[in-house]
Amino acid sequence: MNEKTMFSIIIPVYNAQKTIHRTMISVLNQTYSNYEVIIVNDGSTDNSATILEEFTGHKQIKVIPQNNGGVSSARNTGLKNCSGDYVLFLDSDDWIDNNFLLIFKENLNSFKDNSVDLIIGNLEDDRIGKVSQYGFFNTEDIPSVLGDLEVTDNIGYLHNKCYRKEIIDKFNLCFQEGISMSEDLLFNLRYHNHADNMLVISSSSYYYENLSDSLSKKRVSHQELVVRKKHLTETYNILINKYKNSNLKFFTKGVSKRMLALDMQIVTSMYYSSFSQSGIVSEINELKKKKYPKGIFNLLSRNEKMKFFIMRFNSISAYYALGILYKMRFF
């Protein structure tokens, strides 16, 4: 009788000819062997498909071609075609330590019947902070951990997490298609709404490739940002309602910081979305009316702090100051 697959690694691929070979070698070098790899070639137009053919002889690897639909579509295809007890996500320009899966398996061995809903590790990435609370957390303990994950930005990342497939299937969880950012965060928030426990470990075994054409400087349309805010507001409210009888002060402070940053991004997006001066000034005025938790300024990035400071000006002055930053491609 064949052993049930423990881990499914889902890798979306789009024009990754420069990096996918390294990514795949890191997967094949795993010291733990009970896993499958679902690679979704999302309509690549470079040499990615040819490179992937090198790996199709491995029984653990399945390559699924599809027309280009975006990373969320590719991950959803992977979820529909995987069979492991737990799911992990790997990007085609990143790589993992040889013991990546073994670390998760050894931690799972401490629990019977795959009873852990979510495992979270650290990431080798200087864009986010390290979590400070480690161990196993039941439902009543999760709110304090959520605050830690939110404030350090760990809550939005897929790649340091191991998800129980049963929860994904039971609640029909999938990635939001049609948006270019925050799809990972939305998936995680929706997953957290159904997870009754989590295991947080200190291990760091996933490595990011910080490419020069990073999405951090990508200009996102005003319309998409408004849609993103709608989805995030709804999803955060559902999660906050789940733990309404718990102390969520730290978590909601982190959420307020994230939504403030998004509100400021919505304002600045109006400059390259051809809004009138009166429209932008009106949006600045609305933002200035909002109340934020004490100390939230310290959670903002340097660029966010500058925008927040400017938006405290007289609204007309703020309009022109932001206009100068826009011309300098500050945002």
Image (cartoon, grey):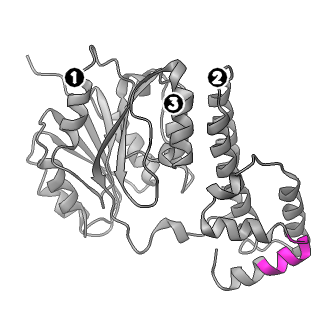
> Which is more N-terminal, label 3 or label 2?
3
Asked if residue 283 lies left or right of residue 60, the reply is: right
Mark 3 Cα within 10 Å, few/some/many (few <14, many 20+)? some
> Which is more N-terminal, label 1 or label 2?
1
Q: CA distance from mark 2 to mark 1?
A: 30 Å
Res 192 label: 3
In the image, what residue occupies the spot 67% across and 51% down?
A: 257
The answer to whether any part of residue 160 appears in the image is no
Segment colored magenta: 313-321
CB atoms at circles 2 and 3 under 8 Å apart? no
Residue 316 painted magenta: yes
**Amino acid type, mark 3:** His
Residue 207 position within the rendered picture, expressed as x and y whole percent measured from the top left: 30, 56
Residue 271 position within the rendered picture, expressed as x and y whole percent measured from the top left: 75, 74
> Which is more N-terminal, label 1 or label 3?
1
Residue picked out by circle 1: 109
Residue picked out by circle 2: 246
**Amino acid type, mark 2:** Ser
CB atoms at circles 2 and 1 under 8 Å apart? no
Q: CA distance from mark 3 to mark 1?
A: 22 Å
The answer to whether any part of residue 275 appears in the image is yes
Residue 206 position within the rendered picture, expressed as x and y whole percent measured from the top left: 29, 51
**Amino acid type, mark 1:** Asn
Choose top left, top right, bottom left or bottom right for residue 30.
Answer: top left
Asked if residue 107 lies left or right of residue 174, the reply is: left
Asked if residue 180 lies left or right of residue 120, the reply is: right
Q: CA distance from mark 2 to mark 3?
A: 15 Å
Residue 102 painted magenta: no
**Vertical comparison of 310 with 285: above or below:** below
Judged by depth in the image, the label closer to the viewer, 3 or 1, is 1
